[in-house]
Every structure is written in C-alpha cells, then in structure tokens.
Image (cartoon, helix red, strand yellow):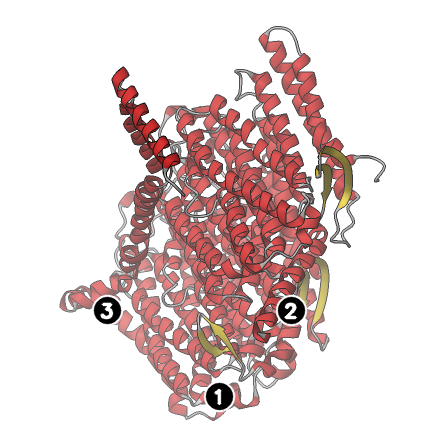
Amino acid sequence: MAIVVVFLPLLAAVIAGFGGRAIGDRGAELVTCAGLIVSAALAAVVFYGILGQHDAQIIPLASWIVSGGVDVSWSLRLDTLSGVMMVVVTLVSAMVHIYSIGYMAHDPHIPRFMAYLSLFTFFMLMLVTADNFVQLFFGWEGVGLASYLLIGFWSDRPTANAAAIKAFVVNRIGDFGFALGIFTVFVVFGSLDFGTVFAKAPSAVGTTIEFLHWRVPSLTLACILLFVGAMGKSAQLGLHTWLPDAMEGPTPVSALIHAATMVTAGVYMVARLSPMFEYSATALAVVGVIGGTTAMFAASIGMAQNDIKRVIAYSTCSQLGYMFFAAGVSAYGAAIFHLFTHAFFKALLFLGAGSVIHAVGGEQDMRRMGGLWQKIPYTYAVMWIGSLSLAGIPLFSGYFSKDTILAASWAAGDAVGRYSYCLGTFTAFLTAFYSWRLIIMTFHGKPRADAETMHHVHESPWVMLIPLFVLAAGATVAGYFTRGFFIGEGRTAFWKASILVLPAHNSLGGVESIPAAIAYLPLVCALLGIAVAYLCYMVRPGIPAALAMRFRALYLFLLNKWYFDELYDRLFVHTAFVLGDGLWKTGDGTIIDGLGPDGISAATRELAREASKLQTGYVYHYAFVMLIGVVALVTWYLIPR
Amino acid sequence: MTHWPLLTLVTFLPLVGVFFIMLARGDEAVVARNARNIALSTSVIVFLLSLLLWIGFDPNTAAFQFVERANWVQIGGFEITYHMGIDGISLFFVLLSTLLTPICVLASWQSVHSQVREYMIAFLVLETLMVGLFSALDFVLFYVFFEGVLIPMFLIIGVWGGPRRVYAAFKFFLYTFLGSVLMLLAILAVYFQTGTTDITVALTHHFPAGLQKWLWLAFLASFAVKVPMWPVHTWLPDAHVEAPTAGSVILAGILLKMGGYGLIRFSLPMFPLASAYFTPLMFTLSAVAVIYTSFVALAQTDMKKLIAYSSVAHMGFVTMGIFAVTSEAVQGAMIQMLSHGLVSAALFLCVGVVYDRLHTRDIDRYGGLVTRMPAYAFVFMAFALASIGLPGTSGFVGEFLILLGTYRVSTLECFLAATAMFLGAAYMLYLYRRIIFGTITRDDLRGMLDLSFREKAVFAPLILLVLWMGIYPNSFLTPIRASIDHLVAQVNAATAGAALHASLN
C-alpha cells in the first residue's frame, strides 16, 4: 500500500504531463487531484499501520547501484518519522492540488502545472521514505528539480527564470556538501544504508579521518557536511538567498514546496540522522547556532518587506531556523512537531495570500492593498487563524510546537540552548509584529489600490476556499490533539526507534521544570509584537515612516535583506563570468593555442619563409653552397683518426 | 556462440553496406535515397547483431570473449595475427558505436543533401573502424583501426563541415599527429620487450619500472589528446563547431572515449607503476579540466562550443576516476563514458535540431522556444539534467561512483571535482534558459516547428537509455564488473609489490 502512496503521484504526473493534450485541462486536474486524494487517504492508513508495529518496516523495490563496496537499493522505509512526513506531504499536496484548480484556472498550461505538482510530491515521498543516503539524495535532487521547474513555470518572465536557476544552483552548492558527506559516511562506515550506518555510529566516536589534509573527527565531519546540504534545501543563513526569489513561482507552489514540504527536508534529514548527530556534540552545536541565528536574521528582514509573499517567505526561513535549533538541542520530536504544525499554518498563510493576490488581480505589493477585509471575509478569517498560529497564541497549533522548542532550548542548559532561546524569544516578538503588519497593511485602513481594482475584488471560489478551511482547521487544532504523541509523555512510544535521543540530551524531558517566567516570556513577546504592530500601523500609521527616516541605515539594511544578494553577485556571480571569459580568451586562446597549435603553425610558416629565402635562383649562389659542401666533406674524410 | 564469428560480422558488416551503396545508380535524388536507406538498414542490422554480444556475454569472467584468431601477416619472425575479442571494458563501447551509427544516419536524413552517397559511406566505414578498435587484440590491428578512424572523421568535418573547417581539421591533425607518432614508438618498444604484438600477452607482461614511465608518457600523448585532457583540449571546441551534427555526435560519443578506453585498456594494466607515479599529475590535470572548462563553458555564446567545453569537464571526471584505481571509481569512469556518449551525443543532436531550422548556433539568436516547441523543450531538458548529473539519470551514477571512489584516495581531489555539481548546473541551466525560456522576439523563431516524427525517433532510444542507466545501472555495471575488478586488483598488486620491494631494499 505504501508503494501505491508513493508511486500514484508519479503515475498521475506522467498521465497529466504526457497525456495533457489528450485528456485536456479538466482531465489533467481530475487525474492529479484524484491521485493525490487517494494517496493521502492511503497514507493515513499506512501511518495507522505503522503506529501498531514496533520496528521500521523496509519494503525493497529493486537493486540500484552495485559497484565495488557500494550496494544501494530502491526501497521504502516505513517508521513513525517517515509516516508523519508521508501524511503531511500527501495531505498538504492534495489541498494544494485542489486549490490550484481555482488559482490556475486562467493559465494556458494547466496540465503541465498539475503534472509538476504531482511529480514534486512523488520525489518528496521518495525522499522521506528513503532507507539509504543515495535514495535520500535522489529525492532531494528530485524535489530540487520540481522546485526549479515550478519557480520558472511562467517562463516568459525573466525574473522567474533567474529565480529558478538561482534556486537550483544555490541548492546544488548545498548538495555539494551533502555529497561529500555521503562519501565521508561511506569511507567511515563502509555502507550507505541507514540501518547499518546507525548501528555503527556509536563506534565511530573518537575516530578521525583526513579531510583536505586536516585530521578531523569523522562523525562530526560527516554530520556537518550533510548539514550543509540541509542548509541549502532549508534556506539557512548563507544559503538562504534563493528562497525569497523563489516566490516568483505561482503561489500554490510557494505553499506546497517553499513552505510546507520541500524546505523542511533539511529538518527531516537531521531528525532522520539523529543516530549520527547525537554522537557529535560539535555538529549539534553547529545546527543549533545556525538555526537560532537564521530564525532571528530572517524575521528581521521580514519586518521590512513590502511584497506579501516575501514577508511569508522570510517567515518560513525564520521558522525553519526554529526547527533547526530544536534539533540542535536534541529536541527532534519538537522539531518535527513544529514542521507538522508549520505545514498547516504556513501553507494556509501562503494560500490565503494567494487568495488575496487572486482577489486584487495579481498585485503582490502590500503598499497597494488595504481595506480588503469586508470584501474577502473568508480569506481574512483564515489569514487571522494562520497568523495566530504562527505567532504562537495559546490553543492554536503553532503555540504548542513553538513554545516547546523554546522551553526545550532553555531546558537543555548549555550555551547553544541559551543562545537559541534568547534569539528565538526575540524572534517571537518580530514574528508577531510582521504578521500583524501584514494583516493590517493588507486588510485594514483605506484602500490603496485604484478604484478599478477595488471594484473587481472578489472572494475566491469554493474550490480554493475549501482547502483553506481544511488547513485552517489543522492550524487551529492539530497541535492540541497531537502534542501528546510528538512531544508529550507518549513520545518515546510514538517515535520508537525512528529518532534517537541520548539520555543525556533529553531536553524535552525538562520542559516542565523550567521557570515560569522563562516559559511565558515568548508569549509575552508575541503579544507585545501584536500590540506594537497595532500601534504602528493601525493607531498611528505615521510611526513606521518616521522610524525608517530616523534609523535610515538600519531600515535600508533590512529592506535590502542584509545585502546578501549584492554581496554574492559581486563576489561570486560576477567573478564567475569574468573568470570564464578570461580563461577562455586568454587561457585557451592566447596561451594554449598561442604556444600550441597556432604558435607552432606560425613558427612553421616563419621557418618556411626563411627557408624559401635560400632559394634565390642564382646559379652562383648554389654553386658556392655546393663548393662549401664538397670542401666540408673532403675535410671530414681527410682528418686522420 | 563461438561457431559464428560474431565479432567479425559486427565489425565488417557495415562494409557490405558500403558495397551496396556504391552499386547504387541513377540520378542524384535516387542515389541519395538509396544510400540513406541502405545505410540505415545496415546499421540497424549491425546494432541488432551487436546486441547478441551483450546477450551472450558472460559477466563472470574477466577473460576476453568472442575471441577470434587467424594468422594474418607473417614476415620472418615478425607476425601479426588477426586477433579480436571483447571483455567487460570493451563490450559497451562496441554497443555504443553500433547504436550511435544508425542514430547519426537518421539525424542526417534531411540535413545532408550534397554527396549523400559519400557521406553515408564515410559513416559506415567509420563504424567498422570504431568497432574494430574496441575489439582488436593485436597492437598492429589496433593501431590501424585507431588511426584509421581519423580519416573518415577528417572527411566528415572537411567536406560537410562549416566555414572554418580547414582550420579545425588542421588543429585536430596537429594535436593527434604528434600523439600518434609517440604511441607508435611506444608500441614498437612494447613489441621489442614482449616479442609479440599480441595485446593479451602485453597486458600481463612485467615492464621494467624505468621503461614504464617513458612508455606511459608516450601512450598518454595519444590518449590525452583524444580524451581530451586539459591543456590539449582546444582542438575539440573548434572541431565540434565545424563538424556537421552527426560528426559531432560521433566525435563526442565515440572519439573521446577512445582516449579513456586506451587509458583503461593499456596504460593501467601494462604500466601500473608509472600510473601510480603519475597519479598526482593526472589528478591535477583532471581537476583543472573540470573547474577551468566549467568556467569557460559559462562564458560561451555558441551552443556547440558550450557543450564541447562541458565535454572536457565531464571527461575530466573520467580521467580522475581511472587514476583513482578503486573499483568504484574505475567502474564509475566506465559508466561516465557511456553516459557521456549518450548525453553529449544527444545534446549535439538537440543543437542540430534548431540549427537545421535557423542555421545559427548563436545562443542569443534563440529564446522562448518552449511556446513553439514543447516536445523539444522536454527532450532538451531531459538531457541537460542528465548532463548535470541528476539522480535517476545516467550522469549521476557515473559521477557519484567516480567521486566516491576518488574520495577514498584523495579527499582534496574529490572536493575540487565535486564543484562541478554546481558549476555544471550553472552553465547548463543558463544555456537552457537562454534558448528555451523567455519570450520570443523574432519572427523566424515564431515559425519554428516542433520535433518531427523522425526526430522523436532519434531521441526516444537515447532518453530511454539515459533513464535505464540511471534507474537500473546494474544492467551495465554487471558485465563491466569482473573485468574492472580484475584490473584494479592487478594494478594494486603490482604497486603493492613494488612498494614491498622498495621497502626491502
């Protein structure tokens, strides 16, 4: 049955992609949506089965690469972790598929779009059910491809094409680390299967490996290299630049790929590899610091953006940071829990934003919105729900996961945990602030769009609203009902062997015993954030502009996203083109060809010209040369030896 | 199986086709049509026959199979035998040759209209020579085939090529000539050492360590040009640019593999000590090739040149894998060569498709083709991804095994070469974007037709093979395994023996 869950989306993608012309737009929508709904329903059944069994179940499919010491297979690994991911992926994907019917209704390439969405789902499922590093990499690259295709879906837009390439190449830089990590794992453990590697991980503690002429602890090296891959996919500090640009893709894509599923693959990877990370304190510390820093950094940028989707994109980046620093303090359960709730409320926010964009005729700039709430009340309501959940307001799903992460960070007690807690709590303030800034700028105040646009503002069709309601329900109650399994008392029985937490790292066990002030501080910060946003944008709309004038440098710094893009363009992109041109024209042209074939041919021509000068045509010249020759020969033979 | 001289049949059957093409009479159009049909049917039959080699191949032995032996020339004590046979190293190169020939014929169906008869003859002769060189087990025979390949190739570039074909052919000649002479000298030296021109004897002969270095260098001179390794690669972009589409296909698909084949077939087993000695050199040149040409590819404005440079980068992986001398890396190098043979051939065919319609290779002249040519966009994307090495395509398996095998030997080398993961993605997607995406700005682009049925028939088998090799590479790895493992063990034993000997002294 798990095989059907994974391969049905592929089948649907193939039918819609290649048969799109035959079955038409409706047919393609029907096939892919039906495929995903069936897949989601079966995923739930599979997950229920997983809960009942004790060990991970491996379904072998076929042998893949057998060469030398390498022996990897195609197979599906079913345990709690992959089960949770399967449910999240298929559920959100099904919702996004249905929503797309409405959102993409006027697009001329519907079958292609639906096929890409289903193809993405297939790769994502292959990723989460992988039982070895290579299949994980297969899914990893596959979702990268789907992301590339969907970001660049509107291929007549130069910005979309640029964003697509940027996403792929930046991800590939991360994968460069990932691949080296895989090789390190192979050299250290002699295998690429999760089972074998995890079993041997404790014995690798204390061993070292030579890497680029340095001796380094082998497990730490492997984990950090693999984490570089996670940083690329999950848009962490330094490799995050592709994610905001990825908003060039259609909004359903942003919801599915760049919020709920693909970008969380890095978090999934760290959780999946917890049996390795647990034995490397250094690697965990790196994960924690990068996660904590990214959370704060991305939220700070989110405050100053004006594009509705970009605000949510930076918010995603920031929330992924939360998940990582949870993993950094070994609270993998909380990380996946936040992944789970985040999938609901962030997909909801994106799809809600899509509904807004749909209503105002494609406008994404919040400065040209405002005053929409009465015209699109359902969208307005779900945006509130999503924001409440994101900000971590009690009883909403996000509250349980986010609070637990912060509590666990404090409970971990080490420096990294404290660092994450402080940044994370401050980020809670920022998060609430930019969320309500978004809501107020979009829905309240006087309409800033022109009358023509305002006249056409309309609520989205039911085919878009129903997925929103489903996700809104998840964003509201999913956390409350499942918290006992993910992070509560039942967590060991729930996760079983799919996640390893060493007894010494049991930060989740300590969340109950942290001081009350520490426990409530994030909530206070969030409420403060809402209040400040209300004050700045509702009560005294002049404040933001005044602040921006007053702290102009800081404002520009945030508005320009800490100048990462400018820096990278100057440093890498521009350099690469200059270097390429130089190597080509100077290296190949002047030096290699100049000294090589062209040089030799020129020298030959020169020699020939010189030689031809000897042929003067005067008989006495020839006679004279002959005479010299004769004299030389005679002399040679006359010399006594 | 041995009753039938299958290998000889596969090798020389194309010449029968040549004979029939020569018989063709009538006006030019009739001759052209007959020549095309005969060439296609002959090459398809040869391909089907060559499949029997794969079916009948015993993957459990490293020994040569389908061996045929006959006395050929005997002058005094000097004798040359007609000695043919294949093992896991040569099997798929033979198949690649027989596969690409019918594809070339099909791809030239309409684009070549002058001297069609001679053109088809050239390709069939080329096929004989290619199959021959991969299955020859006598040095003289090998040398004849190896050098013979250049003649039809020269003609294909020189007669049916582009405007600067003379320069390209001359450059090609200058590079290969020097290498060939040195290899001939080395072959003579091998003969004087072993007393025979039999390759199977030479493969197990122990050459003195000092001599090994000289012979290794002499062989390298020939193979490095063919691969081509940096810095003797500059003939390749020019040759590709001037060659007709099918010429580029053979050039990228087979000719470059002659170098890699030579290194695996001769340099490693005959000169293991020299190979070990020169490994740092080869690693350096390979890493330079990968990084240098990736950057150069980024700066190209000519489609064919860009793909040519990407070929140099991909072949840099091959030379790196060969000299890592681990099972994974060398098998990876084999897969990488097969994969590159399919993928780069297909990419040149992709260039050919739009060149046939617009007669320019200038990237900036294109853009927005996806709206007019969706099938073409799909095909091009598939091969671009295979070139990037996306898992699930053949390109990944080769690169992955090479990098993994190399990592065990040198993390630095692996690190440097792995940069191709993002550099390759950058230049390939940048190329794709400029041709396929964007908006159509010119009228001539607006009128372009999507792939015809014939063109789809050309691409379909290539796509299937690329996926097959990516999803279930064991079909290809299994026949290769015994021969490569044997080779790696042999080389390692020799170097370990020498090290032991040195430590004892």
Left or right of B101, for residue B320:
left
Labels 1 and 2 in the same subunit? yes
Can residue A624 be seen here? The reply is yes
Labels 1 and 3 in the same subunit? yes
Q: Earlier in the sequence, mark 1 or mark 3?
A: 1
Q: Given the image, what chain letter belongs to the residue carrying mark 1?
A: A
Gap in angstroms between the C-alphas marked 2 and 3:
54 Å
Q: Which of the two discs, 2 and 3, sits closer to the camera?
A: 2
Q: Position of residue A594 (x, y in %)?
A: 32, 40
| Residue drawn at 35 percent across, 61 percent down | A311
Q: What amino acid is labelled 3 in the image?
A: Cys
The residue at which mark 2 appears reads as: A193
Density class for disc 1 (Cα within 10 Å; few <14, some 14-19, many ≥20) is many
The residue at which mark 1 appears reads as: A511
The residue at which mark 3 appears reads as: A536
Q: What amino acid is labelled 1 in the image?
A: Val
Q: Given the image, what chain letter belongs to the residue carrying mark 3?
A: A
Q: Position of residue A19 (x, y in %)?
A: 62, 38
Circle 2 — which element?
loop
